[in-house]
Amino acid sequence: MPYGLDFIFIVFLHASLLYLKVYMTETTNEIIMFDKIGQRLLPGSIIVYGHLLSRSAGLRLGKVIKLERKDTMSGYGPYDRITIQGLDCNWYPSHGIHPALLSRRSTLLFPNRTVIINEEQLPENIKELFDTVVV
């Protein structure tokens, strides 16, 4: 047998969770999404996501505004996306001379590539900025 039992179990578990996700969504009309480590994404969640920072990778903070599931016209099935309000703080020194600013609202595909963080982990000035965002 080319695959061990542990591999077959993981594939079965993944398929079962995917079925459960689709089944729960279709029966309750509620969109259910999870982040990279399995936490449920909800409007108002604070997330960390990757973005392009000049010619390198960067991390940005954002607040989830809306969860959406869209159908593709190419027949690949539905895909998930989230609308977020990002925080632009990559170009400013951390010692507070230039404050962090809210960026424009944007849409992220692949919400399972984000990570939810607790608001207790944020500095006070960033909490105050995210408190102004209406979900």
Image (tube, grey):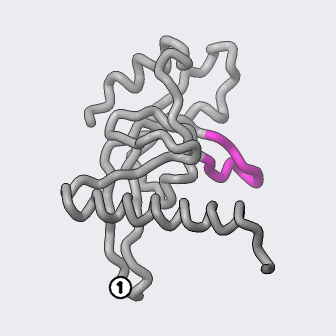
29 vs 89, nearest the viewer? 29
Which residue is located at x 29 percent, y 57 percent?
A: 24
User: For the view shown, which residue lies furthest in the bottom direction?
Assistant: 74
120 vs 100, nearest the viewer? 120
Which residue range is magenta in the image?
50-59
**Which amino acid, by three-letter code, is at mark 1?**
Met
Q: Position of residue 81 (x, y in %)?
A: 40, 59
Q: In which quadrant is the N terminus drawn? A: bottom right
Q: Which residue is mark 1?
A: 73
Q: How many marks?
A: 1
Which residue is located at x 50 percent, y 67 percent?
A: 15
Callout 1 crowding tier (Cα within 10 Å): few <14, some 14–19, many ≥20: few
Q: Is residue 11 left or right of residue 82?
A: right
Which residue is located at x 76 percent, y 68 percent?
A: 4
In the rendered structure, does residue 92 fall within the stretch colored magenta? no
State whether residue 108 is above or below residue 130: below
State whether residue 31 is above or below residue 133: below
State whether residue 62 is above or below residue 2: above
User: For the view shown, which residue lies furthest in the right direction?
Assistant: 2
In the rendered structure, does residue 51 fall within the stretch colored magenta? yes
4 vs 74, nearest the viewer? 4
Q: Position of residue 106 (x, y in %)?
A: 42, 51
Which residue is located at x 45 percent, y 32 percent?
A: 46
Name the secondary structure under disc 1: loop
Q: In which quadrant is the C terminus drawn? A: top left
